[in-house]
Image: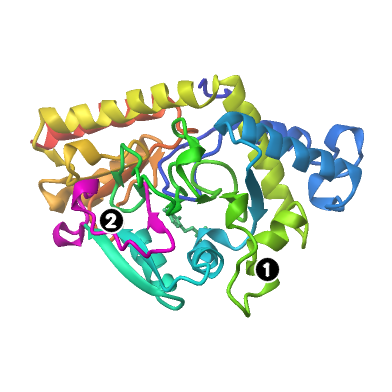
Amino acid sequence: MERIATVERIFNFSAGPAVLPTEVLQQARDEMLNWHDSNMSVMEMSHRGKEFMSIAKKVEADFRELVGIPGSYKVLFLSGGASSQFSMVPMNLLRKKKGADYINTGMWSKKAIKEAQRYCNVNIAASSEDTNFTYAPTQDKWKLDPNAAYVHYTPNETVGGVEFNWTPNLGNNVPLVADMSSSILSRPLDITQFGLVYAGAQKNMGPAGLTIVIVHEELLGAAIPGTPSMFDYKIHADNASMYNTPPAFAMYVTGLVFEWLKKKGGLVEMEKINIAKANLLYDLFNTTDFYHCPVTNSDRSRMNVPFTLKNTALNGEFLKQAEDCGMFQLKGHRSVGGMRASIYNAMPIEGVVTLVEFMKKFASIHA
Ligand SMILES: *Cc1c(COP(=O)(O)O)cnc(C)c1O
């Protein structure tokens, strides 16, 4: 948590690529030219050589340990971003069925839906578009198709700041699929409730370029005819994510983040810290009407906190003064307006404390 005296670091509230732990960046720096007496950089290693193979093995083992992933699930380290998963999921999981259920809770859900529509009938089982995505529809409102191949949802909508604080219970054999790009590793995860989980690394895990897929082995091997090899989960699983060159350096840095998380006490401890960080901001919204958070109380994200200023004419001044105080990337997404503070695992609590103090002062000056 401490700031490093020799390194000036801003508080980076970017939604992604996002802040990484300073300790991780320092270790990557220290190992940059000579990884573990190999006299090579990780960037220069053959992905099939013994050095990188040992890195890859540890990355997967640490990830499995952090989440608690049983052997019946494969963990894949892929490139192509979470956006490629919008296509890979239907290509691999339809299994001769004609449709899939999607829950529409924001910009990323919509992108997933648009891509799935190329391959199947998409049933929008629930949507919060009626309010421009300010809540997570409760499961009693979902109109699921009994013949759906799977149910897809986005547990944390990065743009709207809407998070499901519960896991859907489908109570049958329909696989639950989740895009956890902006919330994975922010809290404990019971993977047995899911058929497939995917996440781009650049929000809460590591550098851009790596996407992790956790998939139950029973779902492998039924890709639709014509699926390119690179889009077939089974091919990646059978080749331990080495069918082609994996995003090796991103995997290595992500592995350092996993070691950092383990040292911090794992996902149970991270969740406690994340709740404390998020509450600092949400408590402020409850005590002032200078700032406003559009999201329903029960569905407010612990990772991405959108808020608007009552007087939008002050937006520019707010951002400028925040930067003067060392806080960057607070501008909200254009679809929501105002501000967004992304406070992923690697954002130290002192960053959030500094932001809240600044916001209180700004409000008192401009009230
Ligand atoms: C950022 C993000 C994506 C897109 O990730 P890419 O790696 O850029 O493809 C998808 N879903 C969610 C929830 C995201 O936050």
Looking at the picture, how far across and down is residue 201, in whole percent?
56, 48
The mark that comes first in sequence, 1 or 2, is 2
Q: Secondary structure at mark 1?
A: helix
Q: Which mark is residue 105?
A: 2
Q: Which residue is mark 1?
A: 230
Instruction: Please name the residue shown 35% across and 47% down the image.
Output: 170
Q: Which mark is residue 337?
A: none
Is 339 located above or below residue 334 in the figure?
Answer: above
Q: Which residues are magenta?
A: 128-155
* For residue 157, side relative to residue 77 (left or right): left
Looking at the picture, how far across and down is residue 28, in whole percent?
71, 37
Instruction: Please name the residue shown 54% across and 24% down the image.
Output: 266
Q: Secondary structure at mark 2?
A: loop
Who is closer to the viewer here, 136 or 331? 136
Looking at the picture, how far across and down is residue 360, in whole percent?
19, 29
Quadrant location of the C terminus in the rendered image: top left
Instruction: Please name the residue shown 63% across and 68% down the image.
Output: 231
- Tell me the CA gap for discs 1 and 2: 29 Å
Q: Is residue 136 magenta?
A: yes
Q: Is residue 196 magenta?
A: no
* For residue 178, side relative to residue 318 (left or right): right
Specify few, some or many for label 1: CA neighbours under 10 Å numbering under 14, 14-19, or 20 or more. Answer: some
**Tally of numbered tags:** 2
Would residue 199 be visible to someone looking at this image? yes
The quadrant holding residue 366 is top left
Looking at the picture, how far across and down is residue 187, in whole percent?
44, 31
Q: Amino acid at mark 2?
A: Thr
Who is closer to the viewer here, 321 or 287? 287
